[in-house]
Structures are given as structure tokens and as C-alpha cells.
Image: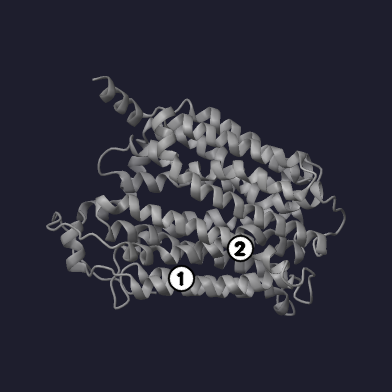
């Protein structure tokens, strides 16, 4: 990993304005994020069926997925902390997402070939280990990209910067989600061979690894990072006292959490519990409830067909989210931020519940339209509402604390979700999807009771 520069702390304020960047510079700066989302989409759409092909029972899947939120909770704050203090010949943020790309690509290649090492360790455990490495590596690569935009862009260009990043995120997610079905329709076998994983999945992961590396290298080669002295002239130096009392500050601020954050915490709990269920159980839910598969179906061609349909459908919700995200500010302007989020969540809830009534697998894409509305809003609106209630100078700490409301519901689901499928739902994962839809509806109701200080201030200005 990169070496850390001992940049002295102090209270120096910025002394210069950051220069504006060209559209090409903004594009290359975020291009690596497309590679991350390409790999992330392959993981979300296919990890469950790969682990099932290695012998995991459907009720065991949440435990294997549990590593993602736990790793995210630990790794992202640490990487953010250390990347703030790093500078070497590669740069400040670049060493981290380059390292993350190399590890992620290795995991993408090894995961579908875990059976080849089964003489040493069972394939399931190798696969689970690769999922853990993949999650950690994605987080290593992902966190510095968000900071890079703030590092390099002046306030006047940040909307454009995050819009370009959102577009590239959506593009990577859409193509990564659709790739397994595309390869399956163009000559790659859907049958699990000696590796235990069908060729269309294996080669999708190989392509994903190559895209990941190439996309990151484009950012590393063509984007610029400001060296320490120039960086300080644009950002100033951090306060030494704040750095030394970081943990104490977090504990203190957690106790003094704004009311709005506590209320949004309930909305987030419902939302992310539902999303975790969708990612973990949709493939098996579709395989059993829509395709009618029973018994030991995890290595069948029909199961891979069901998985391809799910992966492709996930591409639909990412595509819808990519477009809908651009409309959220307009909708919120007319009906308000809370109502916008509530309506979007209702769309997602109804979309997931509708899967229970599907008989034709092709209809799954229509269910995902509603999920796309919810996904775009979940990634944007809670943060818009929250930011208006955070005291000046506390944005970073409270955004970090807010991440717990994303990881905690996933951890709870990982612990209890499999038990529910096995003992409450009688082994039918479709009911986890129905529950996920109901919880999104609960989130929609909950957000209406959130205190939105920013919206109140805006309304008062209009009436003044």
C-alpha cells in the first residue's frame, strides 16, 4: 500500500481558488468508477448462484453476503482516513483505488474457478473467501473516488462532476448486469462444467476483471491529483485538535445526533433490509417460484437461465435509476423532497411484490422499473434531507455515522434472513422478496414523518 506523508496539521485556510476542469478531465477522473460498478454488478447478480453451485443452501446465502456490510463498515472509514494522509509518486487517492482494482480483478477471476482448488479447500469456502476479498477490494477502490471529486472540482462544477460519475456508474452497472445473458445468447454454455460454474458466468467475470483494470488505469494515467502544497492552498490544513480527538468526536456527535438523522435511520433500516433481501434471494426466488424448479436445481441449465434473467433485470433497475436520478431535483421542486422519496419507495415496493405474481420470466424487467425508481432515490434523497440538518463543520463525521444505518440492517438480515427462509417461509425465498416490498412501503410511510429543516427554510423564504 502507499506510504503516508506527514503533512503537518494546523488552522491555515485556503489561499487560492481551485481551477475549473474540462469535461474530458472530469470524465477521465470518474471513468474508473465505471469499472468498479461493472464488477459490483457482476457480484450482485451472480454471487448467490455461484455459491449455490458450490453447495451452499439457500438459507445459508445471507451469511455469505453478510461480509459485505461488515467489511464496508470497517474498510471505508479507514481508507478514507489514510488516503487523506497519503502522498507518493502515484498520488493521494490513486494508490488506493489502483490497489483495490488489482485485488478485485484477481477475486473476479478466482471466484468462478474455486472448484479447481477444491482438493485443498472446499470450493464453497474458497468462493466465500473470494467474495470477502472482492468486497474489501471494492471498498478500497470505491471510497477514494468519492473524495477525488471533492479534491479536484470547485463548488461550481461539483454538480456536473457527480452527474458524470452517476452516468458512468449506471453505464457500468447496466453492462455488467446484462453481460451473462448476452454471452449465454451468443454461444457460451449455460451448463456447469467441471468448474461448477457455467461458461457464460466465468467469461463474464474474466471480462469484468479486464474492464475493471482498464477503467482504473484510464483514471490513473489521465487524471490529475494536486500535490500536498497545492492541495493545501485550495483546501487549507485540518485542525490538529480535531484529528487527535477523532474517536471522541464521533462518540460525542453520535450522542448528539440530529433528530432528522434518527428519523431517517428508520427509513434507511427498512430500505436497506429490503435491498439486501433482493440481492441475496431474487435468483432463487425466481428459479423456484417462476421457473418452478424443485430439488437440487443449483447446477441445472434452468437455474442458470433464471440467474441470467435476474442479472439482466438488475441491469434494468440500474438503467432506470441512472435516468431517474436526473429527474429527482425537478420532481422534488414541485412535490417536496419527502414526497419524492416516498413515491419512489412505493414504486420499488410494488415492483418487488409484483414478482410474486409473475408467470413469465420476461416480465421480471417490468418489476425492476419500480425498483430502479427506489434505488435512485435511496442513493440521493436521504442525503439531501440529512445535509440540511447537520451543523456546520460536522458533515464528514455525520455522513460516516449515517453509514451505520446502511450496514446495520444488512447485518441483521444476514443473521436472520436465512433462518426466516428455512423456518418461517418453508424454504420459499419468494416470501423474502415480498417482505422486502412491504418494507419499502413501510419506508415510504416513515419518510413522511421525517423533520426536513431545509424544506421548511425554503418554504419560509418563499413566503417572506
Looking at the image, residue 182 lies above or below residue 379:
below
Image side of residue 232 versus residue 321, left or right: left
Looking at the image, residue 114 lies above or below residue 236:
below
Residue 373 image offset from top left, x and y in percent: 54, 42
Identify the coloring: one colour
| Mark 2 lies on residue | 42
| Mark 1 lies on residue | 215
The crowd level at tag 1 (other Cα within 10 Å; few <14, some 14-19, many 20+) is many
**What residue is drawn where x is 28% and y is 68%?**
225
Residue 120 image offset from top left, x and y in percent: 71, 79
Q: Earlier in the sequence, mark 1 or mark 2?
A: 2
Q: Which image quadrant for residue 111?
A: bottom right
**What residue is drawn where x is 61% and y is 63%?**
42
Q: Quadrant of the C terminus?
A: top left
Image side of residue 289 versus residue 388, left or right: right
Image side of residue 84 versus residue 286, left or right: left
Q: Which mark is residue 461?
A: none
Residue 174 image offset from top left, x and y in percent: 57, 58
Along the line of sight, which residue is nearer the eye, 464 or 421?
464
Q: Quadrant of the N terminus?
A: bottom left
Amino acid at each position: 500500500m502507499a506510504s503516508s506523508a506527514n503533512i503537518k496539521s494546523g488552522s491555515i485556510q485556503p489561499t487560492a481558488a481551485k481551477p475549473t476542469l474540462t469535461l474530458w478531465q472530469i470524465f477521465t477522473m470518474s471513468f474508473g468508477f465505471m469499472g468498479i460498478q461493472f464488477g459490483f454488478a457482476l457480484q450482485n447478480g451472480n454471487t448467490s448462484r455461484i455459491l449455490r453451485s458450490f453447495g451452499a443452501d439457500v438459507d445459508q446465502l445471507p451469511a455469505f453476503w453478510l461480509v459485505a456490510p461488515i467489511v464496508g463498515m470497517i474498510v471505508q472509514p479507514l481508507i478514507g482516513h489514510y488516503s487523506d494522509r497519503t502522498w507518493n509518486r502515484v498520488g493521494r487517492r490513486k494508490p488506493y483505488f489502483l490497489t483495490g482494482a488489482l485485488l478485485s480483478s484477481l477475486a473476479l477471476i478466482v471466484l468462478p474457478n474455486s472448484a479447481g482448488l477444491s482438493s485443498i479447500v472446499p470450493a464453497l469456502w474458497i468462493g466465500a473467501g473470494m467474495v470477502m476479498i472482492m468486497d474489501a477490494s471494492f471498498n478500497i477502490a470505491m471510497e477514494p473516488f468519492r473524495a477525488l471529486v471533492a479534491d479536484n472540482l470547485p463548488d461550481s462544477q461539483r454538480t456536473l462532476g457527480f452527474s458524470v460519475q452517476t452516468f458512468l456508474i449506471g453505464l457500468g452497472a447496466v453492462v455488467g448486469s446484462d453481460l451473462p445473458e448476452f454471452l449465454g445468447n451468443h454461444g457460451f454454455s449455460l451448463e456447469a462444467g467441471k468448474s461448477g460454474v457455467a461458461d457464460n458466468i466465468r467469461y463474464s467475470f474474466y471480462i469484468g476483471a479486464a474492464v475493471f483494470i482498464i477503467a482504473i488505469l484510464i483514471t490513473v494515467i489521465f487524471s490529475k491529483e494536486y500535490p500536498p502544497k497545492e492541495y493545501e492552498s485550495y483546501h487549507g490544513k485540518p485542525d490538529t485538535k480535531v484529528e487527535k480527538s477523532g474517536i471522541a468526536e464521533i462518540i460525542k456527535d453520535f450522542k448528539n445526533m440530529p433528530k432528522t438523522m434518527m428519523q431517517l435511520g428508520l427509513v434507511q433500516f427498512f430500505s436497506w433490509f429490503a435491498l439486501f433481501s433482493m440481492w441475496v434471494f431474487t435468483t432463487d426466488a425466481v428459479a423456484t417460484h417462476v421457473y418452478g424448479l424443485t430439488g437440487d436445481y443449483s447446477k441445472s441449465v434452468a437455474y442458470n437461465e433464471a440467474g441470467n434473467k435476474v442479472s439482466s433485470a438488475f441491469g434494468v433497475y440500474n438503467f432506470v435509476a441512472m435516468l431517474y436520478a436526473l429527474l429527482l431535483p425537478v420532481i422534488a421542486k414541485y412535490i417536496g423532497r419527502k414526497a419524492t422519496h416516498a413515491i419512489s419507495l412505493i414504486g420499488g415496493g410494488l415492483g418487488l411484490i409484483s414478482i410474486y405474481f409473475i408467470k413469465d420470466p420476461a416480465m421480471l424487467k417490468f418489476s425492476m422499473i419500480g425498483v430502479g425508481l427506489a434505488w435512485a432515490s435511496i442513493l440521493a434523497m436521504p442525503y439531501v434531507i440529512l445535509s440540511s440538518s447537520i451543523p456546520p463543520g460536522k458533515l464528514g463525521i455525520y455522513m460516516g455515522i449515517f453509514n451505520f444505518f446502511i450496514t446495520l440492517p444488512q447485518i441483521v438480515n444476514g443473521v436472520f434472513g436465512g433462518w426466516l427462509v428455512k423456518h418461517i417461509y418453508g424454504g420459499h425465498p419468494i416470501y423474502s422478496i415480498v417482505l422486502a416490498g412491504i418494507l419499502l412501503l413501510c419506508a415510504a410511510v416513515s419518510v413522511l414523518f421525517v423533520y426536513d429543516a431545509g424544506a421548511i427554510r425554503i418554504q419560509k423564504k418563499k413566503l417572506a
